[in-house]
Image (cartoon, rainbow, N blue to C red):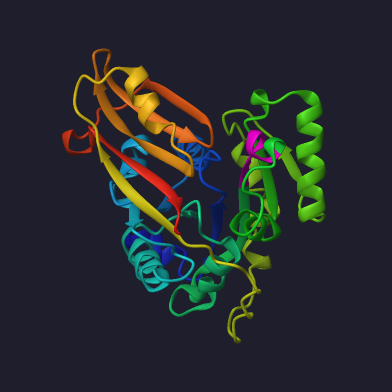
C-alpha cells in the first residue's frame, strides 16, 4: 500500500452516489458494482447508509471487507454528514480505493450528499462525481409517492436507472418515462431489470479521467431548495416458524412504505421485502448473522 501511495500521490478518485426512493433497487445495483469490481480487479470503497439500524445491507452485500462501511440511523446528506466525511477519509487512508461508491438511504438527497465532497479533507482527493438515481418503474406507473423526497431525488440525478421494468406493461413503462422526463428533462434514462447495469455505463472513461476532476478549492455550491420529509422506523420481532401467509397478513398495513429483514420459517431463513403493495419472500442467499434473523425494519412517513 505504501508503494501505491508513493506512485500516485496526487491522483483523484471518482465518486458515485447511488440514490433512490425506498425499495427502488439500490442495493441490488451496488451488488452488481461490487461483483464487476472483483472481476475487473478494481478497488472500490463503499459507504452504505441505512435508515434502520439492523445492518441488513451488509448481510445482503456480503463482501467488501475493510473497504465497506455502513452508516446507520439517519441520512448522510444532513444529520450524518460529518460521519460521512470521517468515514470517507478513513477509507482513503486505509484502502486507497480506485473508486468510491456511496449508497444513500431511500430518503436521502443525492445533491446534498455530493455537496460534502467540497469539504476538507476529502476535497483534496475526490475527483469527478455523479449521482445515479434508481427508480422503481412500478411505483411511477402507479403514481405512488412521487412528491417530496422522490421528486427531489430525481431532479438531482445525472443518470436515472428506471428499474423493475419487467413488472409493468409497455404502456405503463411509457407513462413512467414520460413522468420522469417531466420531472427531470435533462437526465438520461436507462431501463433495467434487477438493476442489471454494466459498470462501464456508471463509470465511463470520461468520468474516470482525473484531468477533468472539478476544482473544489473554492466555496461549495449552495444547497438547492428541497423538502426533506421525515420518516419513522419500527422493528418487528418475528417469531420463528411463522408461515408466509401470516407474515404477509401482518405486513399488509396501510401507510407502510418499505420493509426489509430476515425471518426463519419452516422453509428456512427467508429474506422479506415490502415495496408499496408488493410483498416478496425469498430464500436468504448468504449466511446470515443470527442476530439479524427474526427482525424486520418497517418504514413509514412520520405523522
Looking at the image, which residue is at 74% across and 23% down?
Answer: 169
Looking at the image, which residue is at 53% across and 38% down?
Answer: 25
In the rendered structure, does residue 137 fall within the stretch colored magenta?
Answer: yes
Residue 9 pos. (x, y %)? 45, 69
Quadrant containing the C terminus in the rendered view:
bottom left
Q: Is residue 242 among the parts visible in the rendering?
A: yes
Residue 147 pos. (x, y %)? 66, 55
Residue 177 pos. (x, y %)? 78, 40
Near-viewer residue (38 or 301)? 301
In the rendered structure, does residue 296 fall within the stretch colored magenta?
Answer: no
Residue 260 higher or lower than 20, as above or below: above
**Residue segment shown in magenta:** 134-140
Q: Is residue 211 left or right of residue 116?
A: right
Q: Is residue 51 among the parts visible in the rendering?
A: no
Quadrant containing the N terminus in the rendered view:
bottom left
Looking at the image, which residue is at 48% across and 40% down?
Answer: 254
Q: Quadrant of residue 286?
A: top left
Residue 95 pos. (x, y %)? 35, 57
Residue 180 higher or lower than 279, as above or below: below
Residue 118 higher or lower than 190, as above or below: below
Looking at the image, which residue is at 53% across and 37% down?
Answer: 276
Amino acid at each position: 500500500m505504501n508503494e501505491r501511495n508513493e506512485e500516485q500521490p496526487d491522483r483523484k478518485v471518482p465518486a458515485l452516489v447511488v440514490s433512490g426512493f425506498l425499495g427502488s433497487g439500490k442495493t441490488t445495483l451496488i451488488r452488481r458494482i461490487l461483483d464487476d469490481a472483483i472481476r475487473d480487479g478494481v478497488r472500490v470503497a463503499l459507504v452504505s447508509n441505512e435508515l434502520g439500524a439492523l445492518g441488513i445491507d451488509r448481510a445482503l452485500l456480503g463482501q467488501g471487507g475493510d473497504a465497506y462501511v455502513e452508516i446507520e440511523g439517519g441520512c448522510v446528506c444532513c444529520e450524518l454528514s460529518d460521519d460521512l466525511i470521517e468515514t470517507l477519509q478513513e477509507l482513503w487512508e486505509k484502502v486507497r480505493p480506485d473508486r468510491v461508491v456511496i449508497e444513500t438511504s431511500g430518503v436521502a438527497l443525492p445533491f446534498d450528499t455530493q455537496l460534502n465532497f467540497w469539504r476538507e479533507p476529502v476535497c483534496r482527493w475526490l475527483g469527478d462525481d455523479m449521482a445515479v438515481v434508481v427508480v422503481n418503474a412500478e411505483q411511477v406507473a402507479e403514481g405512488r409517492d412521487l412528491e417530496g423526497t422522490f421528486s427531489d431525488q430525481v431532479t438531482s440525478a445525472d443518470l436515472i436507472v428506471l428499474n423493475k421494468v419487467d413488472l409493468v406493461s409497455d404502456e405503463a413503462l411509457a407513462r413512467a418515462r414520460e413522468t420522469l422526463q417531466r420531472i427531470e428533462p435533462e437526465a438520461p434514462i436507462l431501463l433495467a431489470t434487477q438493476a442489471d447495469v454494466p459498470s462501464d455505463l456508471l463509470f465511463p472513461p470520461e468520468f474516470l479521467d482525473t484531468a477533468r476532476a472539478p476544482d473544489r478549492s473554492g466555496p461549495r455550491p449552495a444547497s438547492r431548495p428541497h423538502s426533506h420529509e421525515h420518516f419513522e422506523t419500527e422493528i418487528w420481532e418475528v417469531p420463528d416458524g411463522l408461515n408466509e401467509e401470516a407474515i404477509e397478513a401482518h405486513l399488509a398495513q396501510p401507510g407502510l412504505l418499505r420493509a426489509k429483514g430476515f425471518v426463519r420459517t419452516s422453509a428456512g431463513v427467508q429474506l422479506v421485502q415490502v415495496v408499496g403493495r408488493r410483498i416478496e419472500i425469498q430464500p436468504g442467499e448468504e449466511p446470515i448473522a443470527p442476530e439479524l434473523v427474526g427482525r424486520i425494519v418497517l418504514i413509514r412517513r412520520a405523522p
